[in-house]
Image: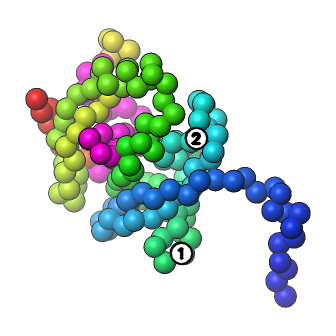
Amino acid sequence: MLSQPSPRSDSYRIPKHQVSVEIALCGGEPEEVSVFLHPRAASHAGQERPSELLLNDEPFLTVVSGDGSVRFINKAAIAWMTVALELEMGGRSDMEAQLATDRCTPIDLTLDDGRTFVGEVSILLPQANSRLQDFLNGSDRFFEVRDARAAHFVNRDRVVMVKVTE
């Protein structure tokens, strides 16, 4: 016999915002799923950002697929994730947004499955190490390529080539 959650246990749940993202697993087709963002971020004012889900230390990401099923995806198996730009940029201070804009490099990126992303990367590194190569050799598993409508989080291990565009 399965027990039902008590009304009291609901009071311990942490409310989260469910948002839509497009995600592709390595070797798979892109799929629209939902992820859950905390209403308050741990490291800044405002809501948690989708990038923080990918860059935290937890190896699995919880998603809800279109049919309502819950899945736990190993982040190492994610080739890329795309979110609406306002979800990622929302809540950034004016200074953060200005820095991200000032230090942008336009690129054309190709993944191991042939998919391409054209956009900009924000190179927020110390001036002495602020080349595109330094950025690409960073330690985070994912990095952001931004275009006019979306933020694309690309798995470094899936990148075959990056060209600077002008």
Please rate how many residues cluster around mark 2, counting C-alpha atoms within 10 Å: few if below 14, some from 14 to 19, many from 20. Answer: some
Front residue of this view, candidates 48 and 109: 48
Seen at 52% across and 47% down, the residue is: 53
Q: Residue 90: image x %, image y %?
A: 47, 37
Picture layout, residue 120 above or below residue 84 = above
Residue 159: in magenta span? no
Q: In the rendered image, which residue does mark 1 sit on? A: 68
Seen at 20% across and 56% down, the residue is: 115
Q: Which amino acid does label 2 sit on?
A: Gln
Front residue of this view, candidates 92 and 163: 92
Counting residues from the start of the chain, the first of labels 2 and 1 encountered is 2
Q: In the rendered image, which residue does mark 2 sit on? A: 47
Where, quadrant-wise, is the N terminus in this rendering? bottom right
Identify the disc placed on residue 11: none
Q: Residue 81: image x %, image y %?
A: 38, 53
**122 with respect to 88 (left or right):** left
